[in-house]
Image (cartoon, rainbow, N blue to C red):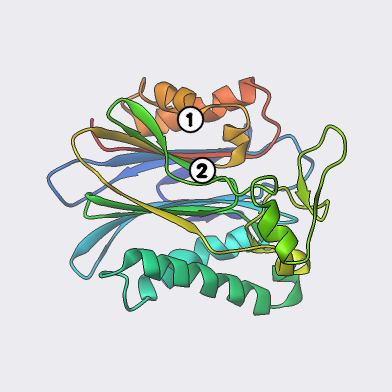
Amino acid sequence: MCIGRLCCFNGAYSQLSGAHYGKGRNHQGPNKISYGFSLVKGKANHPMEDYHVAKFVQTKGHELGLFAIYDGHLGDSVPAYLQKHLFSNILKEDEFWTYPDRSISKAYERTDRAILSHNPDLGRGGSTAVTAILINGQKLWIANVGDSRAVLGKGGQAIQMTTDHEPSTERGSIENRGGFVSNMPGDVPRVNGQLAVSRAFGDKSLKSHLRSDPDIRHADIDHNTDLLILASDGLWKVMSNEDAINIARKYKNPQAAAKQLTAEALQRDSKDDISCIVVRFRV
């Protein structure tokens, strides 16, 4: 079921609050794994530009958990395209079951090329991405471009599984591609004075200075692993990794945890769209 631009996987949408939330769980394996999500529109005067994926699917005798946050800019066409196509492109790669990391990297690049070669309006805007693929509840593959982030709760710690791709930290790559990094007083560093991330899908006018190759990390899910949080920068601008994990750990219900995280970000005066998925490995 889809409501407006937001595709709902076991989800609901509140027109009154502008919030979108839902939950689900796995269906195979000895361990119960559950998830919840919450997306809240920011204060900016434009439509919601965050999209998500949160679901379990069965394919070729395996169960996959597919989770993603896509944070769009200059419109919602690119994150909407990613929501529909990125995971399917990853799973179409011939080497996915033997070399997941190689397949994820190829699919990210292939998807970006498809966006840029599509009609001109699609590639004008752009989007970050953070994706998580959980294979049979045991192997976790995380990838990202941009500043949407994944944090794993393991052994009582908050482990950041992604790299924030910001112009200040990737200045050399941008300048080597003929671009520059600048910022107005009181503003954040931007590529060519425009974009606040150094890697993204789309952004055709800046593409010669941007990268879309993901950073990829792997983790084994064991008895010490309890939580995974994926969120857009609307959360991370006002909350540390440790704060987010500690708040989520207070709730056995991951949907309640996700809703509390977005509510807390609002209370801390985050002005951006705020999107959050919480996956709980132990209940």
Q: What residue type is labelled 1?
A: Asn
Which residue shows up at 71% across the image and 64% down it? 176
Write down the quadrant of residue 100 in the picture: bottom left
Find disc 2 in the rendering and name its residue.
149
Write down the quadrant of residue 135 in the picture: bottom left
Q: Is mark 2 on a helix, strand or loop?
A: strand
Q: How far apart are marks 2 and 1 (CA)?
A: 9 Å
Which residue shows up at 64% across the image and 21% down it? 268
Measured from the top left, where is residue 169 in percent x and y? 64, 46
Which quadrant of the rendered structure holds the C terminus? top left
Does residue 169 appear to the left or right of 139 in the view shown?
A: right
Q: Can residue 186 be seen in this view?
A: yes
The answer to which of 35 and 175 lies nearer the viewer is: 175
Find disc 1 in the rendering and name its residue.
241
How crowded pointer 1 is (Cα within 10 Å; few <14, some 14-19, many 20+) is rated as some
Measured from the top left, where is residue 185 in percent x and y? 87, 34
In the rendered image of this protein, does residue 257 appear above or below residue 130?
A: above
Q: Which amino acid does label 2 sit on?
A: Arg
Q: Are marks 2 and 1 in contact (CB under 8 Å)?
A: yes
The answer to which of 256 and 112 lies nearer the viewer is: 112
In the rendered image of this protein, does residue 78 appear above or below residue 243?
A: below
Residue farthest toward the left in the current orientation of the protein: 30
